[in-house]
Image (cartoon, helix red, strand yellow):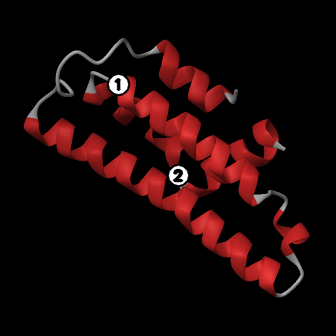
Amino acid sequence: MSATIQTVKENTVSKEDEMKGSEKQIKWAEDIIEKAMASFDDMIKNYDKFQANGVADVLGYSKKAVEAAKADMQAVFAQVDKASDIIDIRNKLTYDALKATVINAYM
């Protein structure tokens, strides 16, 4: 499991209710999550394009690795109960950071 996913897990508890925080924090956290999930989808699309051209190896990751990381992250996000937990690690949930996580932890 990657350090990013482990960090989120360590900062969360079981989700009993909706995410807690101010309305602004909740919206911000939801936007961060949405962008993170879109990043995984973009990685898969890129892989498919490169695979069609026979050069997927240059990406440094596999479609299977991205799908596994995405599934793990979805499970972690489902457990988050405080918007601030997501906001605090937003820099680890960018496209580049998630791509590095896929390459370093799932390959």
Name the secondary structure under disc 1: loop
Residue 18 falls left or right of residue 91: left
Which percent across, then down, holds residue 14?
34, 13
Residue 42 falls left or right of residue 90: right
Which percent across, then down, holds residue 80?
35, 24
| Residue in the image at 36% along x and 48% along y | 32
| Residue in the image at 56% along x and 41% along y | 71
Q: Which residue lies furthest to the left in this view?
A: 23
Residue 36 falls left or right of residue 52: left
**As shown in the figure, which amino acid type bears the numbered disc 2?**
Thr
Label 2 vs 1, first from the N-terminus: 1
Residue 58 falls left or right of residue 21: right
Q: Which residue position holds label 2?
A: 94
Answer few, some or many: residues within 10 Å of disc 2's Cα (few below 14, many 20 plus, some between 14 and 19): some
Q: Would residue 89 be seen by someone viewing this image from the given angle? A: no
Which percent across, then down, holds residue 52?
79, 84
Q: Would residue 30 be seen by someone viewing this image from the given angle? A: yes
Res. 80 mark: 1
| Residue in the image at 79% along x and 58% along y | 62
**As shown in the figure, which amino acid type bears the numbered disc 1?**
Val
Which percent across, then down, holds residue 94?
52, 52
